[in-house]
Image (cartoon, rainbow, N blue to C red):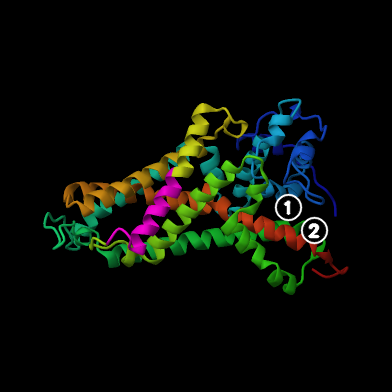
């Protein structure tokens, strides 16, 4: 297979936050220090070399950037301060845009105007839906409370309407993310290697995908176990909240004031704790900048943290105001919550940060498939 060098790759990668990789002179210290690098899948040095050589196709076929969990050991030990950990982070942004067939991921990562504009437009549409569309359908604010003294939330945000919108949004987001994952598979397993993997291997190794998504075990190989813990709480909290809101919304958005030990409230409290704990670690780390992995933050990192924080805070306020019989405060909090949540899901899940939750375990799965791959027979696709 011929190898095509593309010198324009450097200018493309710079747009995704990659700094001066020429500081790296390939001593190999980063690879030797990395607790996640292993035989057959070496990084960060190998990926930096591919970037320097302009080997775009080989980069697009790499799983290694997703196997990196940014422990920070490589950057700390680098004698040239080349910050290989941040290079891998930036490469993940680039690969996210490569998998995305719509081109929106590249727009969001390389243009603050595009991402902010998208957020503002969809936030306005959500607000208008509550202030104009729903009232035109006969749904209005009411100050009347339920028999338990709670706010009649479903009187102005009818559960069947919100649930229908939820499912439509979930279908769109899932379709985009799944199609991007298929492109990831095509580039990693199929396009750039003369290898094939049997269907049985695909089925047999699929458990790795589920296990790595649920447990995030590779994080635990990093010396700083707190990093794994905060990331796991953030991931599990958001995943539970996403499933509850999208799949079990009629159970979650209720006008009843349930006992504090009810499973619905316990799940909500855990999800809230997980989000706030993970956000606290990430935000404080970026403010203090004492740890190497928090030294450099892309604008997309801050927008993600800001939207997720607002989503968590407004969700807490909705709960407090609703059970304490404060209608106006509940409605304002709910509209604000949805105005942040909807654009965040539409941006982050298929195109940005939350898509990494899917790409990482799939990369581990594809890594295992490559271990069992065999050469294709000559003349066969």
**Residue at the spot 75% in from the left edge and 27% down from the top edge:** 23
- Compared across the picture, whether 314 is left or right of 219 comes to left
- Compared across the picture, whether 352 is left or right of 336 comes to right
**Residue 320 at least partly seen:** yes
Residue 205 at what x, y percent from top left?
70, 67
Q: Nearer the viewer, residue 99 or 255?
A: 255
Q: In which quadrant of the rendered view does residue 178 lie?
A: bottom right
- In the picture as drawn, the residue positioned furthest to the bottom comes out as 200
Magenta segment: does it hold 274? yes
- In the picture as drawn, the residue positioned furthest to the left comes out as 144
Which stretch did the figure color magenta?
259-276
Q: Tag 1's secondary structure?
A: loop
**Residue at the spot 44% in from the left edge and 52% down from the top edge:** 345
Comes first in the chain, label 2 or label 1:
1
Which part of the image, by quadrant, shows the C terminus? bottom right
89 versus 189 height, above or below = above
- Compared across the picture, whether 271 is left or right of 292 comes to left
Magenta segment: does it hold 33? no
* Mark 2 and mark 1: Cα distance apart in space: 8 Å
| Residues tagged 2 and 1 counted as in contact (Cβ below 8 A) | yes
Residue 20 at what x, y percent from top left?
69, 28
Which part of the image, by quadrant, shows the N terminus? bottom right
Residue 160 at what x, y percent from top left?
29, 67
Disc 1 marks which residue? 61
**Residue 165 at least partly seen:** no
**Residue at the spot 17% in from the left edge and 52% down from the top edge:** 325
Disc 2 marks which residue? 193
255 versus 200 height, above or below = above
214 versus 75 height, above or below = below
- In the picture as drawn, the residue positioned furthest to the right comes out as 378
Residue 157 at what x, y percent from top left?
24, 59
């Amino acid at each position: 297979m011929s190898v095509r060098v593309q010198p324009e790759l450097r200018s493309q990668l710079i747009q995704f936050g990659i700094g001066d990789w020429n500081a790296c002179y390939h001593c190999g210290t980063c690879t030797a220090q990395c607790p996640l690098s292993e035989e057959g899948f070496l990084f960060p040095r190998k990926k930096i070399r591919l970037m320097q050589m302009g080997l775009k196709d080989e980069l697009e076929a790499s799983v290694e950037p997703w196997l990196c969990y940014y422990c920070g050991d490589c950057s700390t030990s680098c004698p040239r301060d080349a910050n290989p950990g941040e290079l891998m982070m930036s490469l993940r942004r680039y690969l996210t845009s490569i998998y995305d067939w719509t081109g929106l991921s590249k727009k969001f990562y390389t243009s603050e105007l595009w991402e902010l504009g998208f957020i503002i437009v969809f936030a306005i549409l959500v607000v208008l839906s509550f202030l104009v569309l729903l009232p035109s359908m006969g749904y209005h604010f009411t100050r009347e409370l339920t028999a338990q003294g709670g706010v009649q939330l479903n009187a102005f945000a009818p559960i069947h309407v919100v649930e229908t919108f939820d499912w439509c949004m979930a279908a769109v987001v899932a379709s985009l993310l799944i199609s991007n994952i298929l492109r990831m598979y095509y580039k990693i397993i199929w396009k750039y290697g003369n290898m094939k993997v049997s269907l049985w291997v695909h089925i047999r190794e699929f458990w790795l995908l589920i296990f790595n998504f649920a447990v995030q075990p590779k994080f635990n190989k990093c010396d700083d176990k707190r990093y794994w813990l905060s990331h796991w709480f953030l991931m599990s909290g958001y995943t539970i909240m996403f499933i509850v809101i999208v799949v079990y919304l009629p159970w979650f958005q209720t006008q009843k004031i349930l006992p504090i030990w009810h499973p619905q409230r316990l799940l909500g409290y855990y999800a809230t704790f997980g989000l706030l704990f993970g956000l606290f670690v990430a935000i404080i780390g970026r403010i203090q900048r004492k740890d190497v992995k928090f030294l450099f933050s892309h604008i997309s990192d801050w927008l993600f943290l800001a939207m997720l924080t607002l989503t968590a805070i407004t969700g807490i306020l909705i709960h407090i105001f609703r059970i304490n019989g404060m209608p106006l405060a509940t409605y304002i909090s709910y509209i604000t919550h949805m105005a942040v949540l909807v654009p965040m899901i539409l941006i982050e899940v298929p195109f940005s940060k939350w898509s990494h939750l899917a790409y990482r375990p799939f990369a581990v799965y594809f890594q295992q498939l490559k271990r069992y791959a065999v050469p294709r027979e000559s003349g066969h696709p």
